[in-house]
Image (cartoon, rainbow, N blue to C red):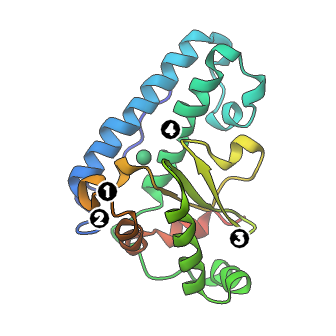
Amino acid sequence: MFTLPDLGYDYDALGKYISKDIMQLHHDKHHQTYVDKLNAAIDQAPELQGKSLEELLGNLETLPETVRTAVRNQGGGHYNHSLFWQWMSPDGGSEPTGELASALTAKYGSFQNFVDEFTTKALGVFGSGWVWLQPDMEIITTPNQDTPINSGQPAPLLGLDVWEHAYYLDYKNKRDDYVKAWWNVVNWQFVQSRVK
Ligand code: MN3
């Protein structure tokens, strides 16, 4: 059985950047639904019980066809959101330091250039999806709840949810304002902890 992880901070902790209403809806309703539907799919394929989310998502083609799409979508949703809550913090914002800062500067010329490029990719996602910073410092996007580990890529260092449910209550259709605000809550310590 998969379970909904705690946020790790209060619903209103991200203040003016991402409201309590969004955090409650996003965590308690959207994420909970991914967990519930993932568990329902695993119930249909008992041989998958006990497998980790990484094992399931990293081997989608080996799963029974009857549950493959559900695991991809609901399991991906659970995986992505479990990380997403940790990628934000009331103490977030500012810039990374150390090895990560050096790697980003080496790749993009400056931290601001990285932010600009990530933002451009976020605004370029058509419909629902995610933007990721990968360990090789490439920025990639995936549609829906797809996640880099589906396609055998390493786990992302950082990711941003650009589904409308992540911002519509606060920002309506203005994804650009949401992405701009989100940089103020990025938990660079957690991102850095994922650098191997
Ligand atoms: Mn979401």
Q: Amino acid at mark 2?
A: Leu
**Picture coordinates of residue 145, whole percent (x, y):** 55, 41
Of callouts 2 and 3, the N-terminal one: 2
Q: Amino acid at mark 4?
A: His
Q: Position of residue 192 (x, y in %)?
A: 60, 70
Between 37 and 8, the one nearer to me in the picture: 37
Amino acid type indicated by mark 1: Tyr
The residue at 47%/46% (across/down) is 81
Marks 2 and 1: in contact by CB < 8 Å? Answer: yes
Q: Name the secondary structure under disc 2.
A: loop
Q: Nearer the viewer, mark 1 or mark 4?
A: 4
Image point (63%, 46%), residue name: 147
The disc, 1 or 4, on the residue closer to the chain's N-terminal end is: 1
Q: Is residue 162 visible?
A: yes
Amino acid type shown at disc 3: Met
**Which residue in the structure is indicated by mark 2?**
14
Residue position marked by numbered label 4 in the rendering: 78
Q: Name the mark on residue 176.
A: none
Residue 80's x, y, as percent? 53, 46
Q: Is residue 15 left or right of residue 111?
A: left
Query: Within the image, what quadrant is residue 36 found in?
Result: top left
Q: Which mark is residue 137?
A: 3
Instruction: Quickly name the residue at label 1.
Output: 9
Is label 2's Cβ within 8 Å of ligand 1?
A: no
Q: CA distance from mark 3 to mark 1?
A: 28 Å
Question: Which of the two discs, 4 and 2, labels the residue nearer the N terminus?
Answer: 2
Check disc 1: other Cα within 10 Å, few if <14, some if 14-19, many if 20+: few
How far apart, in angstroms, are the residues tagged by discs 1 and 2?
9 Å
Residue 170, by quadrant, is bottom left
- Up the image or down, 62 lies above or below 31; here it is above
